[in-house]
Image (cartoon, rainbow, N blue to C red):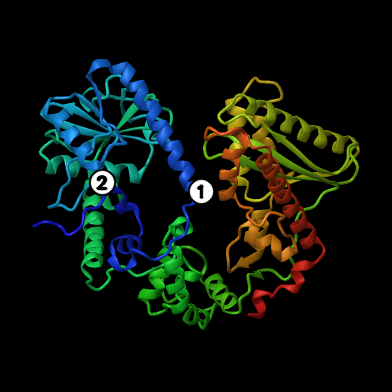
Amino acid sequence: MRSSVLLDAGVVSRCRRRVHLEHDPAMADVPKAPPDPTAEQRKADAAAHRRAVADRMARLIGAEWTEIPRSAPSADRERATLAAVRGGARFVWSPQLPSDPTGGRRGAVDLIVRVGDGYVPVLVVRHKVSDPGSGARTSPLAEPFPDGARTDPLRKVRAQPRDQLRLAHAVRMLQAAGLMTSGRATGGAVGMDADVVVWHDLEAPTWPGGRTALAEYDARFADRLAVAAAAATGAPALARPSRVVECRTCPWWPTCESTLRENRDVSLVLRGEDAVALRAAGYATVDRLAALDPEGEPPAPMVGMPFPDAVLLARAFLRDYSLVRRVPEVTVPRADVEVDVDMESFGDSGAYLWGCWLSGADVGEPAGYRAFATWEPLPTDDEARSFGEFWTWLTSVRLRARARGLTFRAYCYNELAENRWLLASADRFAGKPGIPDASAVREFISSNQWVDLFGVVRDQFLCAHGKGLKTIAPAAGFAWRDPEAGGENSMRWYRDAVGMDGQPPDETQRQRLLDYNEDDVRATHALRRWITDGGPNAIPYTGDL
């Protein structure tokens, strides 16, 4: 029996409601949110990485390499793929696998490699596929065969569920077309380092509960296929909207948000498993959650946040409070000399700008904003210069404060990003002028001189509309000069600023990024002063809710 829809590998990792909306004919003309710039940049970076890996493998493998043009229509690519495999091609790059109308599958994979009587799939991805350790089965790029793989003494497989599910989709398509090699279902992945193929046994019980990747894929795909088929045929919907992490970048979010607000859905304040559990227990609305006793027993197990916080957050949401205090008095660590730090990065390519706002006691230079930037397109060695200058300046301020007998602290908002690039920059550019030893960076970020204001907010406030700086700083009276200020838009500004798309570098966009970065560090400075000056006292206290 033929399926009424054909689905690609992405559906098994996608929100069920999104799968419904994408296949509901009645939703075809509904306005959607514009593409998320950050997600678009990640796609562009991934495409560039795949191209670089393909070129390298083609050079290593030589005449046995066959490539199917990605720009050709799908039908033409499928015919070219079938011609290549029927001709016995050993390596086929960018194949369009034969559609499987019985199984409801369509899709492509980065590479198929002939092994024995059939093919095995290989993905090329722009993330790590292994970690230091041992036990991973790997093979060199020049010989990407699972039967020749060795047990690597230096690598262990990194858990990447999405990769395994994509490989399982390709395996099922190859099997349906009679092109899969006999034996155990196997697939490979080439990661960010692009030096080996890491092989996955898709029939090994490596998933929770002893499941295999193939069994997990089959269960998820059958579910998504049922959801899409119901939507396509006008049957009752099998998936209802619920706010999840994916909503932040989903083009269908305006549609779902409208429905959720109309229904006052509990996922407006709780995400994921907690919202599902409360709905199942009969508490599907914010109103019902808010009416519960925060000191009582939860109606369902809570894994995302403590039950009392969930109830109080629901009450704050109903009163349209963006912030409520967890504690009677909000505090923040202060010092005589203070520096607010904000880093701007471009995807995984590097950190092109370190901005600082110096304030407090005199250390021999004027207070205010400083920027340490490179405007050469990332990745570039000039990033080492800008980072080295930033670290040298920051260290000099710390030393001058100490010499004057003054206390010092530096502040950021959500240290995960800054810490990542502080450590990565020290590792990548070790030995270059001004670059600190990684141990010095670790000592600094683990000291009380490095303060994460996000942690201050998380620990002392409940935030009904999120904890991002753009949400919290306005409560302290701060406003960004640029009405389009945001991390997503900065990705687009950066492309223009350095001339990444074949256009001359745009000096106005460079200044726009500097102004945006300056406002970010001024925002953390304003937030800290607001807390110290008692501003949070005007915000409701959870004890009063």
Name the one closer to the observer, 188 or 227.
227
Name the one closer to the observer, 79 or 366.
79
Where on the picture, by quarter, is residue 153?
top left
The percent position of residue 326, horizontal first and vertical second, equals 65, 69
Identify the residue at image location x=31%, y=26%. 138
Amino acid of disc 2: Ala
**First in sequence: mark 2 or mark 1?**
1
Q: Secondary structure at mark 2?
A: helix
Alpha carbons under labels 2 and 1: distance apart: 31 Å
Mark 1 crowdedness (10 Å alpha carbons): few <14, some 14-19, many ≥20: some
- From this viewpoint, is residue 342 visible? no
Where on the picture, by quarter, is residue 468?
bottom right
- Label 1 near label 2: C-beta < 8 Å? no
The disc at residue 213 is: 2
The percent position of residue 442, horizontal first and vertical second, equals 64, 35
Name the quarter where the N terminus is drawn. bottom left
Amino acid of disc 1: Pro
Farthest front residue in view: 503
Question: Closer to the camera: disc 2 or disc 1?
Answer: 1
Identify the residue at image location x=45%, y=78%. 262
Identify the residue at image location x=34%, y=66%. 27
Mark 2 crowdedness (10 Å alpha carbons): few <14, some 14-19, many ≥20: many
**Relative horizontal placement of residue 213, taking residue 39 as reference (left or right):** left
- From this viewpoint, is residue 345 visible? yes
Residue that badge 1 annotates: 37
